[in-house]
Amino acid sequence: MGTLHIFDMDGTLLTGSTANLEVARRLGTLPELQALEARFAAGELDTRGFSATLHTLWGHLTTADVTAAYTAGPWLDGIADVCADIRARGEHSAVITMSPDFFARHLLDLGFDDVIASRFPPLPFSAPLDPAGILTPDDKVRLAEELRTRHGLPRTRCVAYGDSMSDAPPLPPPHPHRRRQRRPPPGRHRRRRLPRPRPHRGLPPRPLPATQLTRRPP
């Protein structure tokens, strides 16, 4: 029996940072993003309101900007090696993140089978943002369950990799296995190597009936 490996992106694969922070650094909009995050932390905005404001703030964002921000990010070392190891054992890997899909989809190039993220219009934004495409914490639970069901695996064969208790939802009780990376203090980007999963663990490659899903081509 295989195993499903579900990875968080912000603070886990992308250590000590987030997709939004890296894009904001590239565009010179860090003060605006920090103000937005403060409103989100205070409960003034949900993920959809947050994303709608980003859509307006980054109206001229280009694919080249995103690629540069992604490339400059403090990624863990060894991600591609781990994905290759998982695949070689017939197992499956996925990333579920509430961050924008225009950033997260780059992870497919490292070998993840599925990347599920909040859906934004094509860059540069010329179409309105559809709130239904923006993920919430509850969506992470639903999507993880859909992945697990699609591969016909029990919860005991699912492993979640995250950096904090905010990543606990993807594997609901009663049988989740979770590994966590400790989050460095803000501003300190210590590069670490992603540990290889144990031989009995792995991940699957196929699509979900979810609009946010980006799938690695065969």
Image (cartoon, grey):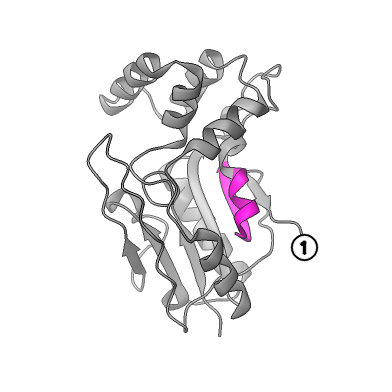
Q: Residues within 10 Å of mark 1 (few under 14, many from 20)?
A: few
Residue 161 lies, in percent from the top left, at 39, 61
Q: Is residue 138 visible?
A: yes
Question: Which quarter of the image is occupied by the N terminus?
Answer: bottom right
Asked if residue 145 is positioned above or below residue 123 in the image, the reply reads below
Q: Position of residue 58 (x, y in %)?
A: 55, 17
Q: Is residue 116 above or below residue 68?
A: below
The residue positioned 63% from the left and 52% from the top of the image is: 108
31 or 100: nearer the eye?
Answer: 31
Residues shaded magenta: 105-117
| Displayed quadrant of residue 123 | top right
Position of 43 with respect to 142 (left or right) is left
Image position, residue 122 (x, y; %): 70, 28
Q: How many marks?
A: 1
The verdict on residue 116 being magenta is: yes
Q: Is residue 182 left or right of residue 77?
A: left
User: Within the magenta stretch, is there residue 204?
Assistant: no
Q: Residue at x 66, y 49 (%)?
A: 214
Q: Nearer the viewer, residue 78 or 109?
A: 78
Q: Residue at 44% of width from left, 16% of height from top?
A: 29
Q: Is residue 81 above or below residue 129?
A: below
Q: At label 1, which amino acid type do we have?
A: Pro
- The quadrant in which residue 24 appears is top left
Residue of label 1: 218
SS type, badge 1: loop
- The answer to whether any part of residue 49 appears in the image is no
